[in-house]
Image (cartoon, rainbow, N blue to C red):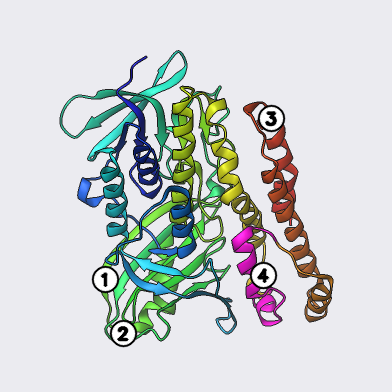
């Protein structure tokens, strides 16, 4: 049956735009839609930082060009993780921590332009209202502009890149193997401000600071990301667990007293809030004629809530897989299935391991964190390796030295050892992702005992 487009993509963020670019470059007809005005696409709450390795990966996958200099505002050489006592810190320096601070709006605009130049058609100021179905399978979208009647547009494949809300994913039928709803405990809410600080100069603007404090930001953290010597992106994020505080209140209370008030007179450039999923990826990101990308697919780092790099990676893998399916003239769930293991092998397995680690972090105290930093029970190299691979490993001799250092906190050491094992277990399960939809239920059952153990750790 003839359709208006090969692919319609709902959402023109970095994930959706990368999908559009990848498909258009391969010669497919693509329409990507966004509710924002065309010149405002890319403007959103964000830490405005990205690891250079994500761009390298994207270039290898889909030959994305170099980022224009006007987008990158400051080079980043590392991240400092800072204990609640603010006396002890772990400096992470390596391939996953070098990167850039960038202009989020310019970044978003560049990605949209990239897709348009490749041949994709964009439709801004447009809302996606509902999925269309033909014989029980996704067949297109109903959209609306501010003025004018609703319009139905058909496609062979529809991509949901609508962000954390997963507007289209939520409309899938109950018979779909795809998860439609995300638990509240698997979300993070955040608030961030951007300031000019004429009275204060950041000594190391090429290092980003992340502060842990379980009393103030339970299940989350505060970030202070300099964007040069006299400008800063500062905010906080917390898990939306029962009784969590509003991050705007945390910002106006704890963050303001602890940091912002020490910078003298500041000029507010921007203030906004946002939400992001922080969990493993959606268990299957495809169904017949339907694909998830970016936040809608939960392609976000569960520890720090960063999703730009992983959403671009998801968009590239999705675009490649959809293109292959279109060329086979088969866009069934079986034909699109390969997108799942491709993403999991490149990022999803690590993401799931970090999701397990998230539950460990939720259940430890400020005293535990201070002790672990002070005694170097956890080292920067451990966290760097884990952030790169999702795997935790250190040799027998190293384990003995840490056992001696941690004497008096044996229960904490045992929990660290347990969570390391669980992280490695879940990585192994993800590396053994089923080859077809028939194996999905049995595979999901293997996750259950790991998560039960992680939440009890």
Q: Position of residue 222 (x, y in %)?
A: 48, 69
Q: Nearer the viewer, residue 9 or 404?
A: 9
Q: Nearer the viewer, residue 427 or 68?
A: 68
Residue, x 55% and y 72% (percent of image)?
94
Figure check: 50 above or below 188 = below
Disc 4 to disc 3, how far (Cα)? 34 Å
Residues in magenta, as a range: 368-391
Residue at far left of view: 147
Q: Residues within 10 Å of mark 3 (few under 14, many from 20)?
A: few
Q: How many marks?
A: 4
Disc 2 and disc 1 in contact, CB within 8 angstroms: no
Q: Nearer the viewer, residue 360 or 447?
A: 447
The quarter holding residue 344 reads: top right
- Give whichever of discs 1 and 3 has the lower sequence position: 1
Secondary structure state at the residue bearing disc 3: helix
Which residue does the numbered mark 2 point to in the structure image? 264
* Observer able to see residue 456: no
- Give whichever of discs 4 and 3 has the lower sequence position: 4
- Give whichever of discs 3 and 2 has the lower sequence position: 2
Disc 1 to disc 4, how far (Cα)? 37 Å
Tag nearer the camera, 1 or 3: 3
Disc 2 to disc 1, how far (Cα)? 13 Å
Task: Tell me which secondary structure the magenta stretch mostly adopts.
Answer: helix
Which residue does the numbered mark 1 point to in the structure image? 268
Secondary structure state at the residue bearing disc 2: loop
Tag nearer the camera, 1 or 4: 4
């Amino acid at each position: 049956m003839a359709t208006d487009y090969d692919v319609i993509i709902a959402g023109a963020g970095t994930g959706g735009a990368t999908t559009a670019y990848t498909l258009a470059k391969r010669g497919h007809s693509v329409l990507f839609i966004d509710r924002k005005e065309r010149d405002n696409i890319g403007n959103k709450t964000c830490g405005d930082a990205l690891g250079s390795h994500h761009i390298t990966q994207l270039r290898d996958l889909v030959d994305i060009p170099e980022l224009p200099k006007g987008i990158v505002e400051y080079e980043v050489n590392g991240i400092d993780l800072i204990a609640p006592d603010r006396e002890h810190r772990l400096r992470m320096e390596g391939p996953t921590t070098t990167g850039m601070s960038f202009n989020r709006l310019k970044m978003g605009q560049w990605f949209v332009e990239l897709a348009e130049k490749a041949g994709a058609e964009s439709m801004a100021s447009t809302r996606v209202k509902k999925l269309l179905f033909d014989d029980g399978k996704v067949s297109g979208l109903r959209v609306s502009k501010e003025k004018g009647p609703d319009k139905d547009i058909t496609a062979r494949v529809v991509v949901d890149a609508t962000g954390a809300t997963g507007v289209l994913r939520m409309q899938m039928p109950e018979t779909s193997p795809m998860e439609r709803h995300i638990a509240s405990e698997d979300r993070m809410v955040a608030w961030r401000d951007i300031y000019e600080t004429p009275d204060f100069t950041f000594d190391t603007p090429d290092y980003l600071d992340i502060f842990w404090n379980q009393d103030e930001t339970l299940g989350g953290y505060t970030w202070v990301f300099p964007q040069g010597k006299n400008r800063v992106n500062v905010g906080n994020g917390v898990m939306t667990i029962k009784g969590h505080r509003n991050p705007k209140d945390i910002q106006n209370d704890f963050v303001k007293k602890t940091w912002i008030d020490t910078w003298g007179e500041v000029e507010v450039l921007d203030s906004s809030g946002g939400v992001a999923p922080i969990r493993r990826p959606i268990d299957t990101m495809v169904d017949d004629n339907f694909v998830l990308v970016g936040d809608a697919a939960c392609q976000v780092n569960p520890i720090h809530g960063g999703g730009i790099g992983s959403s671009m990676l998801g968009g590239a893998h999705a675009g490649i897989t959809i293109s292959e399916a279109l060329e086979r003239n088969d866009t069934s769930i079986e034909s699109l299935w390969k997108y799942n293991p491709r993403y999991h092998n490149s990022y999803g397995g690590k993401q799931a391991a970090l999701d397990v680690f998230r539950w460990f972090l939720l259940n430890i105290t400020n005293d535990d964190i201070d002790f672990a930093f002070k005694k170097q029970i956890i080292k920067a190299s451990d966290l760097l390796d884990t952030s790169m691979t999702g795997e935790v490993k250190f040799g027998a001799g190293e384990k003995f030295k840490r056992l001696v250092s941690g004497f008096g906190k044996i229960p904490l050491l045992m929990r660290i050892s347990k969570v390391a094992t669980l992280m490695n277990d879940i990585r192994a399960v993800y590396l053994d992702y089923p080859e077809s939809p028939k194996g999905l239920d049995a595979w999901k059952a293997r996750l259950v005992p790991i998560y039960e153990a992680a939440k009890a750790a």
